[in-house]
Amino acid sequence: MKNQIVTVPAITARKNSGKKITALTAYDFSFAKLLDTTAIDLLLVGDSLGMVSQGHENTLSVTLEDVLYHTRSVKRGAHRALVVADMPFMSYQISVEQAVTNAGRLIQEGHAAAIKLEGGARMADRVHAIVQAGIPVMGHVGLTPQSVHQFGGYKVQGKTFLDSKQIKQDAKDLQKAGAFSLVLEGMPEELAGEITQDLEIPTIGIGAGSKCDGQILVTHDLLGMNPDFAPKFVKHYAQLADVIQNAVSEFIDEVHSEAFPGPEHSYNLKKGSLKQVNDGH
Ligand code: KIV
């Protein structure tokens, strides 16, 4: 899909196409611009920005204004990949009306093409109403981080028969409500595989094994920006923390040794020009 603008129907059409969907998070202009030059299909302005950009312990402090700000920044950099904005905690849980109003703001003011919200069957009425308003919705089931306190931590979900039955039902209810795709997070590969087979819409997995229709990761995790964060489901495709720390250390050394800035990085007056300027006064 390189160079071709990615639309919501194009993502839906990838189901059973034989080509997996690739998705990453983006929170700012520079990363969005860089990621958009690759063949990545989808950029999610995830509420994970609460941890990655703001340094919080979880996603619960992120506000709608935060997501709007980051979505606008990402949209200035991404002109090809599909930009999806995450609905933060308490921006859709209160009522159907609140959910539609805030989803509308992410499209109208943030310029996202679609929104994502967490929760299964109990959020189906929100999903239905938002879709009825003409806004594409990506669902998110399994380990939904906004429910971290209910789960008692970031624990893999769907390990018991009853839990897995509920997650399968959640997925079906979201599809019925009109979701165009579904994030499956933190669940056994077998369960994610069954859900993927059962649904007509594509599934995008994170910590859900290899059987989903696509995969999403937090960009900073993929790039190894925080080497201390290495859960089982993350693969560090680069060690950017090392690259950044080495570059900065080199800069510090060169400033101390006066190797930087060299003549090639300095602006110099042409010989005699200072005299002419002075003569002119
Ligand atoms: O907020 C986020 O980054 C997410 C993805 C990890 C799915 O929800």
Image (spheres, grey):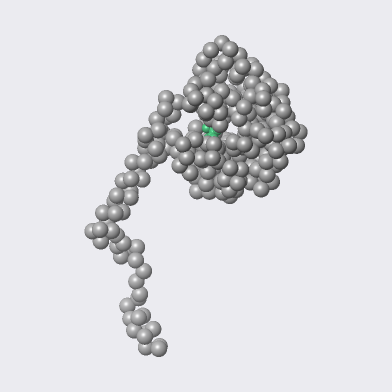
In the image, farthest residue toward the left: 257
Q: Residue at x 60, y 28 (%)?
A: 140
Q: Is residue 40 visible?
A: no
**Residue 222 position in % (x across, y down):** 44, 34
Up-down relation of residue 260 to residue 157 (above or below): below
**Residue 176 position in % (x across, y down):** 71, 23
Q: Residue at x 68, y 21 (%)?
A: 173
Foreground of the two, 193 or 272: 193
* Residue 49 left/right relative to 83: left
**To which quarter of the image does residue 17 belong?**
top right
Q: Residue at x 56, y 31 (%)?
A: 146
Up-down relation of residue 239 to residue 12 (above or below): below
Q: In the rendered image, which quarter contains the N terminus? A: top right
**To which quarter of the image does residue 7 belong?**
top right
Q: In the rendered image, which quarter contains the C terminus? A: bottom left
**Residue 156 position in % (x across, y down):** 49, 21
In the image, farthest residue toward the right: 132
State the count of labels. 0
Q: Quadrant of ligand 1?
A: top right
Foreground of the two, 80 or 132: 132
Q: Is residue 145 visible?
A: yes
**Residue 240 position in % (x across, y down):** 38, 40
Q: Residue at x 37, y 35 (%)?
A: 227
